Image: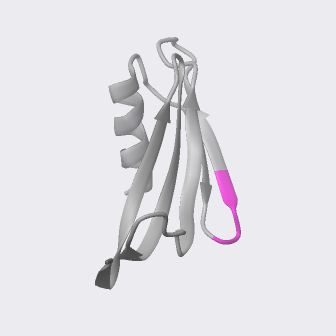
Amino acid sequence: AYLPLRTGVNILALNAGSSSLKFRLFRMTELRPLAEPEDVLAGGRVERIGQPEAKISLIHGPLESSQCGDVRASSISEAAYAIIQHLT
């Protein structure tokens, strides 16, 4: 059984390490076990978490335009907040 979705859903996947946080934002039109995402909308990472020179890098959309910059991330939760702020 699976859950068909009328408009689809975006899923943010996070992978936390000791000083980095990687992410991908997927678009799905149905939710079922082992379903492949329809689209990868964005991806990236925050590196050097806990240090004053923390950096965020993002890759957006099908043309894979990228951006990079400084970010305040003294913890994994601040890094996750920074990712969400950059995606919205």
Lateral position of residue 63 relative to residue 19, left or right:
right
Q: Is residue 66 above or below residue 32?
A: above
Which residue is painted at 38% across and 70% down in the image?
32
Foreground residue among 72 and 41: 41
Q: Position of residue 15 (x, y in %)?
A: 49, 36
Which residue is painted at 33% across and 77% down in the image?
2
Lateral position of residue 44 relative to residue 35, left or right:
right
Secondary structure mainly formed by the magenta segment: loop
The single residue placed furthest to the top in the displayed view is 51
Which residue is painted at 53% across and 75% down in the image?
38
Foreground residue among 20 and 53: 20
Q: Is residue 55 above or below residue 51?
A: below
Foreground residue among 24 and 31: 31
Q: Is residue 36 above or below residue 87?
A: below
Q: Position of residue 51 (x, y in %)?
A: 52, 11
Residue 3 in which image quadrant = bottom left
Q: Position of residue 26 (x, y in %)?
A: 48, 63
What is the count of numbered marks? 0
Looking at the figure, which quarter contains the N terminus? bottom left
Q: Say how the picture is coloured.
A: one colour
The single residue placed furthest to the bottom in the displayed view is 6
Residue 5 inside the magenta-drawn segment: no
Residue 48 in which image quadrant = top right
Lateral position of residue 2 relative to residue 21, left or right:
left
Looking at the figure, which quarter contains the C terminus? bottom left
Foreground residue among 78 and 30: 30
Which residue is painted at 42% across and 30% down in the image?
79
Residue bounds of the magenta highlight = 62-66
Q: Position of residue 24 (x, y in %)?
A: 52, 52
